[in-house]
Image: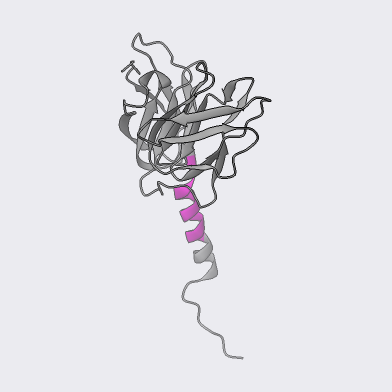
Amino acid sequence: MPQTKSSRPPLLTEALLGLACAQAIAAPLSVTVLDANGSPLPDAVVSIEVAGGKPTAAPGTQAEMGQRDRSFVPTLLVVQTGTAVSFPNFDTIRHHIYSFSSTKPFEIKLYAGTPAAPVVFDKAGTAILGCNIHDRMTAFIHVVNTPHFAITNKAGVATLEVPAGDHTVQAWHPQMGDKQPPQRQGFKAQAAGGPRVIRLGSASKP
């Protein structure tokens, strides 16, 4: 039987695939967020906007912020733009939650259980939530244009994995409220070489 010619030898094809995978390997990145005094700042949101990345979440992406013991759980939720967030009420009393923030103004009037329709957060920024019935209930939903995000630990450090390339790191803290945008800093991520620490400016109150 006559042999058919291949446009590329199999070994070369495998080598090229291996090279493509190597170029896309994610590298660990450690980001340290400091306050005005240079001390580590816990509970700060760190997000990485990857060059060429898709800003909106995949269709059907969901998250949850519940109410339990007359508190929001969690009190800080980070989601990618386009995420649908549900607000189940696990208490035996009704809640009336709302947000007046320009990022996503909404209101779910007195209810128990889980509302039928989640709220889609379709714009990057911060929404501060409250309850009309319980004034002490407060929470934050921080919306970012990337799937790469994390919250800093007690040492003020967040660890993420990002591909090599020129990207932008952002840092935001609840002290900054819903009016102050995240601090941004460009950086170049390497495919190897271990974690890289980026120290950002302080997160001050508005």
* Near-viewer residue (22 or 135): 135
Identity of the residue drawn at 47% across and 47% down: 57
Q: Is residue 172 left or right of residue 97?
A: left
- Image position of 53 with respect to 68: above or below: below
Q: Position of residue 168 (x, y in %)?
A: 34, 36
Q: Is residue 158 left or right of residue 70?
A: left
* Near-viewer residue (12 or 179): 179
Identity of the residue drawn at 50% across and 65% down: 13
Q: Is residue 57 left or right of residue 123?
A: right
* Near-viewer residue (102 or 113): 113
Q: Position of residue 101 (x, y in %)?
A: 38, 31
**Res. 160 visible in picture:** no
Q: Position of residue 185 (x, y in %)?
A: 31, 31
Farthest front residue in view: 110
* Near-viewer residue (190 or 76): 76
Identity of the residue drawn at 47% across and 72% down: 8
- Image position of 152 with respect to 14: above or below: above
Quarter of the rendering containing residue 197:
top left
> Which image quarter is the N terminus in?
bottom right
> Which image quarter is the C terminus in?
top left
Quarter of the rendering containing residue 117:
top right
**Res. 89 visible in picture:** yes
Quarter of the rendering containing residue 118:
top right
Q: Is residue 195 left or right of residue 95?
A: left
**Residue extent of the magenta highlight:** 15-26
Identity of the residue drawn at 36% across and 21% down: 176
